[in-house]
Image (cartoon, rainbow, N blue to C red):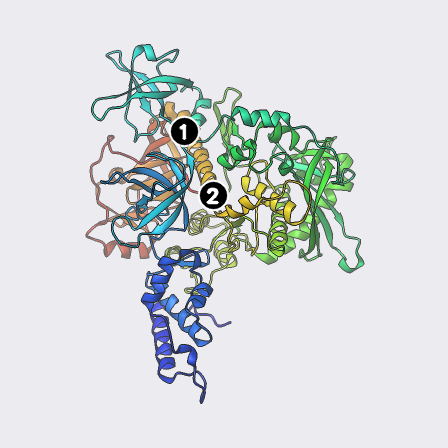
């Protein structure tokens, strides 16, 4: 296939224009043969209008079908679409085209206020700005009528809504019809109780956007100054202070265990199970074998973190004795059969969907399902009978999956192992648990893993090297230390088994034409590709232009900087160029894993997406009761959007809690100097991640030095206008801690390291920007600084 990497967008557009003009003039691609397919061609305006009005049918095939284009007319359409994309008139999302700033047909919205006529106004809950502060989420008008039977909603609510483009071009570009209310912000405020010098009691809200609340002394209850409390607003007037009363004492702020409760309350994460849910869970009893296949003689084992409380996956492998598959292996993956206990539409099911997933904090877990289910009946405990949904997969010696089948079984875990324990046994140090199963279980598992690894290496998924830090707490809940857990083959073995089981689930359901929720990951957008390309150019690394990028090309870049000074920097920039994974009933594949069909199947205890996939498999493969319902099939788009949102909510809450824990831990070390790495560069200043703790702190641009500093987005740097020296993403620097705010999870630093010369491309950029995109502004300790943050995974 010819490569277009050496053709500029401008030249390519010119060539396409000439080709279309030639076709239109001759009416044919072949001598003596007229091409009637070009007789009626849509204009650019026709295409743009169709895409705006039909966001659900905006793929190339959909557009061609809508305009009845065939033959050479499809080539004409492809050229126009490429021109519109190059010009920024269209952008690619998944496999569909859309206008920049457009919205999907179903979205999660936050209701933020009312318009002059009293209508409710909302904005998308998750809107990608790509670092552009001017790229604000669009306003959406909520459509209501007397016949509307949707739920009652108000300001502060989060809703799932059907999006429509406003046809009369008056008011907001989009309107929406409420499908369901996802969250309802109760009339309460979370914050820290303070007493003023005058003796007045006030609440300092965790959310800085909320006003302080005045609390009468007789409304304090047993709360004390410094406590983290929840306050019920009793009176809120347009003028005058807001008043309230303490409804709950979350805990003393000097207890780090209270910090995770800030995130739970701030993000409205459901953490208390309704009585109806707990009652249903308590009524559940262990299941009998019944019509299930009996797999209790297969020595499946669970391999999890040492501190795991629930075990939802077990594995086993054996050599394939088929003479036609020499060197091949059979891999068994058994997953807890949650669908056997959680029926569609039941109280437990509704609460699980509301939560979307479990949320993991350093000091606690907010589970998706009650403990009776997650830690007992569905946990694959050693030596106990448990129902499971299992995949049996056969691999060739080259790591290619030949076939797979799914089974509803009763299993009995032969052993519960920790990652380090299993790895130690393979490395020659078995213990009393692993020694008896070395030959029968562990060695065949590792042999099967190395077979599957050959297939993975041939597939070439994206291989980013960004180790995640883990906070270890003391028994009292205080920060002990931050470690980077060693990445073992035991981790990779379980990961590859789970990936292959997920692929098998997606393949089986697609083969049965069964609607499901896929785990999708789009390729990087053209804008992010171009930004990455410009950055790599400053390191003398080339990235093909115009080509359809694959993970292998990114891996090639990463291998070039392996063990160099730029390794972590390039890994971070490549990560930020990637799209965000999500759940969607429309499949576009998974770019990062380089897989065409992928669905989450292996963690139904902690992810609702997996429970839906289990039900789809049970129903389509006729594996008994608990299959997917018609209502669920009809609402897959809404479910996918909702659980994608709860996943992002959980990730944000988890990161913010880590930031608060670190800020609390460092509050007593103001003035100390730390080593860190520049982890983010913005127009406002620098984010620096501490080498010891991993938490980010902020350095306002105003405090960097006594000259104007200019921001170079492409090269992720800031540099002095006169000297050309500055700081860049990935630089190792020394910083002094100036301020720590545990409630906000924010750290503010002062730069200690001197600025350094930057690459020539960056210097050229700053010479061309003498007008200054960023100035020094006011300096001093009162300078405002954004909330500390961690980058997404």
Please name the residue shown 44% across and 68% down the image.
Answer: 64
- Mark number, residue 660: 1
Residue 198: x and y in percent read 23, 12
Can residue 529 be spotted in the picture?
Answer: no
Q: Quadrant of residue 114?
A: top left
Under circle 2, the secondary element is helix
Residue situated in front as seen by the camera: 761 or 188:
188
393 over 294 or under it: above or below: below
Outermost residue on the front side: it is 147
What residue would you read off at disc 2? 644
Question: For mark 2, does the 10 Å Cα neighbourhood hold few (<14), some (14 to 19), or many (20 or more) residues?
Answer: many
Q: Identify the mark nearer the N-term, 2 or 1.
A: 2
Q: Is residue 577 left or right of residue 342?
A: left
Residue 229: x and y in percent read 38, 20
Which callout, 2 or 1, points to the residue nearer the camera?
A: 2
Residue 153: x and y in percent read 36, 35
Q: CA distance from mark 2 to mark 1?
A: 25 Å
**Mark 2 and mark 1 residues within 8 Å of each other at the beta carbon:** no
- Mark number, residue 350: none
Q: Quadrant of residue 340?
A: top right
496 over 33 or under it: above or below: above
Please name the residue shown 24% across and 24% down the image.
Answer: 237
Please name the residue shown 46% across and 34% down the image.
Answer: 654
């Amino acid at each position: 296939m010819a490569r277009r990497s050496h053709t500029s967008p401008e030249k390519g557009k010119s060539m396409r224009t000439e080709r279309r003009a030639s076709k239109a003039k001759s009416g044919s691609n072949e001598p003596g043969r007229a091409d009637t397919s070009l007789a009626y061609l849509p204009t650019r305006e026709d295409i743009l209008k169709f895409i705006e009005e039909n966001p659900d049918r905006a793929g190339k095939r959909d557009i061609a079908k809508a305009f009845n284009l065939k033959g050479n007319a499809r080539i004409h359409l492809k050229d126009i679409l490429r021109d519109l994309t190059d010009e920024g008139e269209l952008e690619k999302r998944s496999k569909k085209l859309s206008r920049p700033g457009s919205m999907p047909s179903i979205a999660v919205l936050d209701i933020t206020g009312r318009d002059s006529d009293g209508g409710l106004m909302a904005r998308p809950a998750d809107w990608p700005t790509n670092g552009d502060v001017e790229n604000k989420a669009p306003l959406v008008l909520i459509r209501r009528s007397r016949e509307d039977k949707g739920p009652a909603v108000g300001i502060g609510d989060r809703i799932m809504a059907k999006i429509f483009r406003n046809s009369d071009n008056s008011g907001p570009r989009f309107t929406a019809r409420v499908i369901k209310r996802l969250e309802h912000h109760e009339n309460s405020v979370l914050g820290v109780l303070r007493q003023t010098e005058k003796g007045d009691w006030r609440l300092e809200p965790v959310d800085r956007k909320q006003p302080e609340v005045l609390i009468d002394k007789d409304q304090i209850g047993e709360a004390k100054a410094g406590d983290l409390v929840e306050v019920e607003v009793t009176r809120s007037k347009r003028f005058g202070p807001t008043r309230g009363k303490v409804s709950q004492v979350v805990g003393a702020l000097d207890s780090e265990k209270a910090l995770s409760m800030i995130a739970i309350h701030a993000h409205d994460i459901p953490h208390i199970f309704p009585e109806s849910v707990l009652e249903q869970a308590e009524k559940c009893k262990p299941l009998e074998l019944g019509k299930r296949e009996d797999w209790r003689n297969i020595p499946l084992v669970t391999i999890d973190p040492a501190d795991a409380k629930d075990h939802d996956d077990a594995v086993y492998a054996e050599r394939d004795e088929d003479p036609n598959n020499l060197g091949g292996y059979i891999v068994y993956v058994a997953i807890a059969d949650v669908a056997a206990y959680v029926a569609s539409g039941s109280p437990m099911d509704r609460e699980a969907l509301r939560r979307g997933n479990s949320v993991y904090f350093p000091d606690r877990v907010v589970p998706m399902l009650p403990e009776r289910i997650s830690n007992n009946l569905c946990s694959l405990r050693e030596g106990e009978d448990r129902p499971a949904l299992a995949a049996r997969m056969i691999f060739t010696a080259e790591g290619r999956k030949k076939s797979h089948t799914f089974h509803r079984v009763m299993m009995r875990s032969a052993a519960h192992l920790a990652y380090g324990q299993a790895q130690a046994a393979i490395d020659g140090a078995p213990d009393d648990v692993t020694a008896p199963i070395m030959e029968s279980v562990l060695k065949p598992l590792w042999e099967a893993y190395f077979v599957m690894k050959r297939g993975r290496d041939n597939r070439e998924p994206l291989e980013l090297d960004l180790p995640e830090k883990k906070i270890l707490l003391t028994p009292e809940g205080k920060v002990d230390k931050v470690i980077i857990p060693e990445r073992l083959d035991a981790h990779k073995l379980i990961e590859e088994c789970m990936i292959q089981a997920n692929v098998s689930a997606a393949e089986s359901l697609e083969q049965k034409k069964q609607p499901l929720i896929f785990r999708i990951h789009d390729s990087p957008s053209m804008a992010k590709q171009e930004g990455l390309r410009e950055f790599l150019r400053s390191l003398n690394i080339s990235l093909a232009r115009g080509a359809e990028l694959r993970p292998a090309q990114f891996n090639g870049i990463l291998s070039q900087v392996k063990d160099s000074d730029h390794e972590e920097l390039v890994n971070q920039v490549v990560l930020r160029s990637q799209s965000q994974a999500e759940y969607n009933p429309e499949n576009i594949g998974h770019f990062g894993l380089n897989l065409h069909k992928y669905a989450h199947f292996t963690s139904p205890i902690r992810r609702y997406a997996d429970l839906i996939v289990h039900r789809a498999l049970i129903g389509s493969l006729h594996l008994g009761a608990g299959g997917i319902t018609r209502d669920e099939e009809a609402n897959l788009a809404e479910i996918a959007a909702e659980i994608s949102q709860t996943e992002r909510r959980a990730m944000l809450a988890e990161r913010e809690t880590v930031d608060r824990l670190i800020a609390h831990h460092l509050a007593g070390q103001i003035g100390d100097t730390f080593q860190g790495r520049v982890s983010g560069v913005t127009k406002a200043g620098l984010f620096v991640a501490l080498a010891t703790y991993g938490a980010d702190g902020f350095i306002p641009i105003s405090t960097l030095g006594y000259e104007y500093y200019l921001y170079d987005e492409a090269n992720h740097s800031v540099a002095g206008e006169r000297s050309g020296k500055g700081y860049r993403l990935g630089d190792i620097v020394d910083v002094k801690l100036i301020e720590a705010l545990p409630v906000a999870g924010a750290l503010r630093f002062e730069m200690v390291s001197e600025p350094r010369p930057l690459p020539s491309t960056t210097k050229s950029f700053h010479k061309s920007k003498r007008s200054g995109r960023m100035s020094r502004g006011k300096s001093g300790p009162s300078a405002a600084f954004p909330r500390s943050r961690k980058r997404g995974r």
